[in-house]
Image: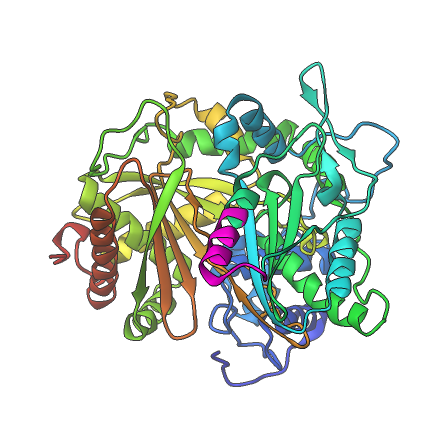
Amino acid sequence: VAQREYEAPQGEVEETLARLWQELLDVPRVGRHDHFFELGGHSLLAVQFASRLREACGVEMPLRMLFSTPTLAALAAALPAAEMPDEPALVPVARDRRLPLSLAQQRLWFVERFDRQASLSYHLPLALRLTGALDVDALKASLSRIWERHEVLRSFFPDDGGVPYLDFLERPFVLPEQDLSMLPGDARSAAFDEIALHEARAPFDFAHGPLIRARLLRLDSDDHVLLVTMHHVISDGWSLAVLVRELGALYPAFRMGHSDPLPPLPVQYADYALWQRERMQGERLERDMAFWREHLSGAPNLIDLPLDRSRPPIQGHRGDLVRFDCPADLARDLRAFDERHGATLYMVLMAGWAIALSRITGQDDVVIGTPVAGRQRREVEDLIGFFVNTLALRVRVEPSTTVAAIVAAVKETTLSAFAHQDLPFEQVVEAVQPERSLSHAALAQVSFTWHNEPTGGTLALPGLTLAPVEQAMVDTHFDLSLHLTDVGDRLSGQIIYAAALFERSTVERVAELLVQVLHCMVMADATAAGALPLL
């Protein structure tokens, strides 16, 4: 974390900004000349900062403003030009009427109705190994409290004449237990694998619920595995971190006989769904649709990847993955590179992935799907629910364009897209009207995910050591999905690929190419993309 020579903030606005930066960036103090991104800020924290600023000062700060005036004093001087938010208040609404699904939920409801196999690929399984003296009653009480606390976990979707609406289960949460400890070693492992696979893959009943299930497996007196599976229609990656964090607070409290230590939630997901629908109409809706139409006008319908097998007539979702690392020296160089170019690491990595894809496809125009957390309001940061959205980012990689210019273009594209991120992906598809095919995903067949969402910290439960259990099955909605995670001194990567299309060796070569692209980028940012020595 880089802090410049300290000068105390001056005036109410600077003091408010300094307080918000301290809380978000977890630094002891912030001075007038400190720089948001040098203090550890990135795109997701910038979105969270904007939501806190809206709450504290009632102003709508575009992300672009933070990138153009990233020091505290400069941002405080620019803020008077920010607009007042013009949108309905996000508040609890009465449950005395039928409530709609969110726009993203409605899309998955349609998927479930017309393609059950595709719906299975939207399951979010979590498996935690608990080694040590487990207090089963405290665990059950903790999960029950989370079930009561987050209304969305109790939701299901009846329909009236083909129009779905929200309803909620009244019953308590159930955690079935299964004892495998009497089985011999190999049989126990086989039984565990079979149960874990069934828990992860068994279909959910949207019309009657629940859309979450859990099971506790006892492997030995001091060895348990907790399996939790949620459908994406009520959850997302951020939600898993919320669940883990709340479990970490509730279990020790209930184990000691104390009451629930968690603060009450200001709103529930159903309140957000109604707010979203009220907000996404009229001029705002037209503005977002016009942006995406223009952004994707004339973009290629299909990326020309070097497939090992022909594309089947109906897209499969079975995947596999290749792991790789960006070593510490490369990670360090990438961080220096992003500071030099006034970009975030996410933007630099997106540019690198676009250059790599351009080289393997021969296309100088690529569309990359990228998820955004969709939690632009402070009120929803602690909620379990389906907020994540996918943006289709278009990157032009002309062979004669320099690396520095491509990074600058990706930065510009990202900031513009983030300003229009509220329009759900399915509505973007409807606005753009690409040629549809059952054999591949619409708009983007490759994706990039930069994992910097809150992890919920390390889950620590008293008397237990915890470890995630690797899932045997991988699903994918894309041909190639690049995932990169900041793990301290290096970047950990994996490419999830459609098993119907690629051999593992091909994807291993793609990973090697990407690492080589990133090495070349940081060494020669004035070099044209087509001249990078990638062999």
Q: Residue at x 39, y 39 (%)?
A: 318
Q: Report the side of 128 relative to 513 (left or right).
A: right
- Residue 312, position in %: x, y? 30, 26
Above/below status of 330 relative to 165: below
Seen from the viewer's position, the closer of residues 480 and 84 is 480
Quarter assignment of residue 225 = bottom right
In this rendering, the count of numbered labels is 0
Determine the residue positioned at 53% across, 56% down: 65
Name the residue at 32% across, 67% down: 334
The percent position of residue 226, horizontal first and vertical second, equals 61, 58
- Color style of the picture: rainbow
247 part of magenta stretch: no
Q: Main secondary structure of the magenta part?
A: helix
**In this view of the protein, which residue sits in the foreground, 159 or 171?**
171
* Image-based side of 147 in relation to 333, left or right: right
Quarter in which the C terminus is drawn? bottom left
Question: Could you tell whether 166 is left or right of 214 in the image?
Answer: right
Q: Is residue 212 visible?
A: yes
Is residue 183 part of the magenta span, yes or no? yes
In the picture, measured across the screen, residue 61 lies left or right of residue 118, that is: right
Q: Which residues are magenta?
A: 182-195
On the image, the x and y values in percent for residue 12 come to 72, 70
Residue 495: image location, x then y, percent: 34, 51
Pick whichever, 190 or 108, lies toward us: 190
Please say if 222 is above or below 387.
below
Q: Residue furthest top?
A: 161
Q: Is residue 79 visible?
A: no
